[in-house]
Amino acid sequence: MTSFSAKRIVFTGGSGKAGRHAIPELITRGYDVLNVDMVDFPDPSANVFTLKTDLTDSGQVFNALTSHFNFGGYEGPNVPGPPDAVVHFAAYARNMLVPDNECFKGNVTSTYNVIEAACKLGVRKIIIASSETTYEVCFGQGDLDYSAFPLDEDADVNPMDTYAISKLCGERVARGFARRFDADIYALRIGNVVEPHEYERDFPKYINDPKLRKRNAWSYIDARDLGQICDLCIQKDGLGFQVFNATNDTITATFPTRQFLEQWCPNTPITREMSEWEAPLSNRKIREVLGFKENHNWRKYYNPE
Ligand SMILES: NC(=O)c1ccc[n+]([C@@H]2O[C@H](COP(=O)([O-])OP(=O)(O)OC[C@H]3O[C@@H](n4cnc5c(N)ncnc54)[C@H](O)[C@@H]3O)[C@@H](O)[C@H]2O)c1
């Protein structure tokens, strides 16, 4: 149902792996959400309205951002205006789905279109999905090492693969538009997204074969906790352009972080004190700046002992 007082959030790419859990989390937290995607929301019982939109077409984006959220919108007194916030998750979510040039074109164009339309329509809060892959190793050629641990947001990053470069370009667009429109645009460097059913299936492999998770820096984000992070970003005003790692608190290993990293990445320096089980792709900034408190630590769903 449409509530005429709740904050209105346009969420792009909500039919995907992350959005299908993040949107219900936002609805539980009291928001009205319109899903803007090319395909329907996968769970019909969740009552999420999808406006079929190709975000690489700027005209469609401007229209989608000034759309009713569902047919209930016609019952209210007003024609729709822009939303209170935009969460932009739509993308080719990795390399090798389409040829590299299409990945670059699709991701950079849709991110540009969403940020431009939102800013020009007066939206003051935009959250975009960036990626762990910007830290170079995930889709880097060969067995690369990270430059240092923990991976913090202020590191200089220079990824070589197209998907990560497209995400870094998105961050750059965000930074420029935040400056030009004095808007808050927060880029989430999202870790490997884990859905509820994946803990039991995948974590035994991750724990038994640590090499498997090097490209994800032995870190992850629960898709529902990612919804919480979006909520916290919507609530936190006035930070301008920001990059936030979006990961859960702890390393996906059964040894404490320092001991584990010294064994598996002996040549990589550890540049600050890390808490005993801190995720190498550290979420310290979202904990300290946004007040993130994870609800879904992996050990709740898989006990390796
Ligand atoms: N899955 C991960 O582990 C991970 C990790 C880091 C970052 N990310 C980023 O998080 C976001 C969400 O990832 P995901 O795993 O849910 O991806 P996904 O591929 O499951 O979902 C992406 C959604 O975007 C939609 N989409 C793609 N192009 C579109 C377009 N032109 N117009 C409208 N909709 C379009 C797709 O239909 C799909 O529903 C992406 O931006 C991805 O790059 C994901």
Image: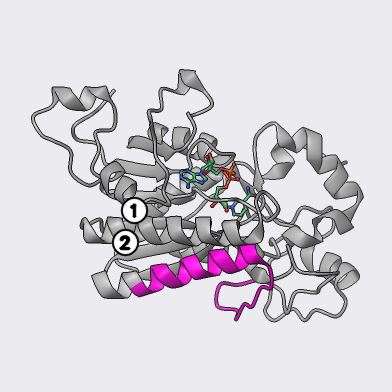
Residue type at the position of mark 1 = Ser
Front residue of this view, candidates 236 and 7: 7
Would residue 29 be seen by someone viewing this image from the given angle? no
Q: Secondary structure at mark 2?
A: helix
Q: Position of residue 42 (x, y in %)?
A: 53, 27
Q: Which residues are magenta?
A: 150-176
Q: Which mark is residue 116?
A: 2
Q: Which residue is mark 1?
A: 58
Front residue of this view, candidates 275 and 30: 30
Residue type at the position of mark 2 = Glu
Q: Position of residue 18 (x, y in %)?
A: 56, 42
Q: Is residue 193 left or right of residue 39?
A: right
Alpha-carbon neighbours of circle 2 within 10 Å: few (<14), some, or many (≥20)?
many
Look at the image and say whether residue 34 sits in the magenta stretch.
Answer: no
Check the picture and name the quadrant holding the C terminus: top right
Q: Position of residue 120 (x, y in %)?
A: 23, 60
Distance of label 2 from label 1 (alpha carbons): 9 Å
Asked if labels 1 and 2 touch by Cβ distance under 8 angstroms, the answer is yes
Q: Nearer the viewer, mark 2 or mark 1?
A: 1
Look at the image and say whether residue 174 sits in the magenta stretch.
Answer: yes
Q: Which mark is residue 252?
A: none
Would you identify the image quadrant in which residue 5 lies? top left
Q: Residue at x 58, y 56 (%)?
A: 102
Check the image and report above or below for 209 versus 108.
Answer: above
Alpha-carbon neighbours of circle 1 within 10 Å: few (<14), some, or many (≥20)?
some
Q: Residue at x 83, y 48 (%)?
A: 206
Would you identify the image quadrant in which residue 299 lies? top right
Q: Is residue 278 left or right of residue 62?
A: right
Front residue of this view, candidates 90 and 32: 90
